[in-house]
Image (cartoon, grey):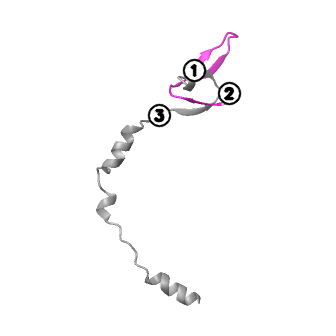
Amino acid sequence: MKIIATLLLASLPVPQVPANLAQSAQPAAHFAQQAKASPRKGGKWYFARTGHAVYCYGPVMTLTDTGGGIERVATFCKNGQVMVPLKD
């Protein structure tokens, strides 16, 4: 029985992938249209001091706090937050 199954699998045709398709410089047209429909802003996930994950678009900055110490903050986050203190 195993021999019959092996022979059947070996007799199936294997599709050949054209070599020039993988090396084409231009992507297909539907990929370009799809990319324009939903542009990404290039943000990053951070762990806030409150214990929540936040998605921010701006750079991480180091600021001085009121006690004279320094704190890291993520800038330009979702939900209209300009700065979110990060947990170190």
Left or right for 39, reference 87: left
Report x, y in % for residue 39: 41, 36
- Label 1 amino acid? Gln
Report x, y in % for residue 45: 58, 34
Which label is found at residue 42? Answer: 3
Location of residue 47 (image quadrant): top right
**Residue at image location 52% in from the left, 85% down from the top:** 6
Q: Nearer the viewer, mark 3 or mark 2?
A: 3
**Residue at image location 57% in from the left, 20% down from the top:** 81
Q: Which residue is mark 1?
A: 81
- Label 2 amino acid? Lys
- Secondary element under disc 3, as helix, strand or loop, is loop
In the image, residue 33 sits, relative to residue 67, either above or below, namely: below
Give the mark, 2 or 1, whose residue is nearer the N terminus. Answer: 1
Looking at the picture, tell me which residue is in the foreground, 75 or 39: 39
Residue 56 among magenta residues: yes
Give the mark, 3 or 2, whose residue is nearer the N terminus. Answer: 3
- Label 3 amino acid? Gly
- Measured in 3D between alpha carbons, the distance from the residue under mark 3 to the one under mark 2, in whole angstroms, is 21 Å
Q: Residues within 10 Å of mark 1 (few under 14, many from 20)?
A: few
- Secondary element under disc 2, as helix, strand or loop, is loop
- Secondary element under disc 1, as helix, strand or loop, is loop
- Measured in 3D between alpha carbons, the distance from the residue under mark 3 to the one under mark 1, in whole angstroms, is 17 Å
Task: State the extent of the magenta-drawn residues as a range.
Answer: 53-74
Q: Are marks 3 and 2 in contact (CB under 8 Å)?
A: no
